[in-house]
Amino acid sequence: MEENRAFIKQAALTFFDKRPEMYDLYESLESAITESYPSVNIKVQKTQITFSNRRVFACVSFMRPLKKFELPPSYFVLTLGLSYPLDSGRAAVKTEPYPGRWTNHIIISSQEELNDELYGWVRQAYEFAENK
């Protein structure tokens, strides 16, 4: 388990090579998710980091969901799979790739954005993926 954790950490550091200032913020998010859901699977890929149980419930990426001038200088995007579109200004983009499944893209640029509201949505995404 420790070897796997070290491998994931190194892969995540590499993922954040172009935006190293965002790594600590990502690490806070990852820690909160793994503390709440110890059996979560984390997979670092070229364009995203996925969190899954039975299915993927959250992804971190550097996608650009808005025009460049609408984005903060440094950010990452947390994408959550839910059964509904988030009714919040925090969701930059909401899409329904197929009926009953919504991807909600949330821009994260500061520690204050990692709050109870966000973690409530993460919990709902986790449960939605687990019960799908």
Image (spheres, helix red, strand yellow):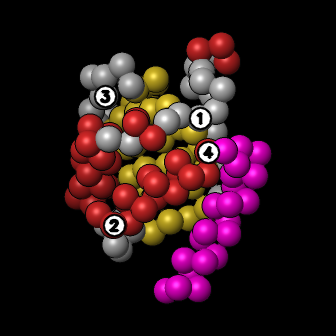
Q: Could you say whether the residue bearing mark 4 is in a helix, strand or loop?
A: helix
Q: Residue at x 60, y 78 (%)?
A: 6
The disc placed on residue 22 is 4
Q: Residue at x 50, y 65 (%)?
A: 42
Q: Residue at x 59, y 35 (%)?
A: 75
**Crowd band around label 3 with a 10 angstrom C-alpha radius: few (<14), some (14–19), many (20+):** some
Q: Residue at x 26, y 37 (%)?
A: 117
Labels 3 and 1 touching (C-beta < 8 A) = no
- Image x and y of residue 96, in percent: 39, 30
For disc 3, the marked residue is 85
**Image side of residue 98 versus residue 116, left or right:** right
Picture quarter containing residue 8?
Answer: bottom right
- Image x and y of residue 62, in percent: 63, 39
Q: CA distance from mark 4 to mark 3?
A: 26 Å
- Image x and y of residue 74, in percent: 64, 33
- As shown in the figure, which amino acid type bears the numbered disc 4? Met
For disc 2, the marked residue is 35
The disc placed on residue 100 is none
For disc 1, the marked residue is 75
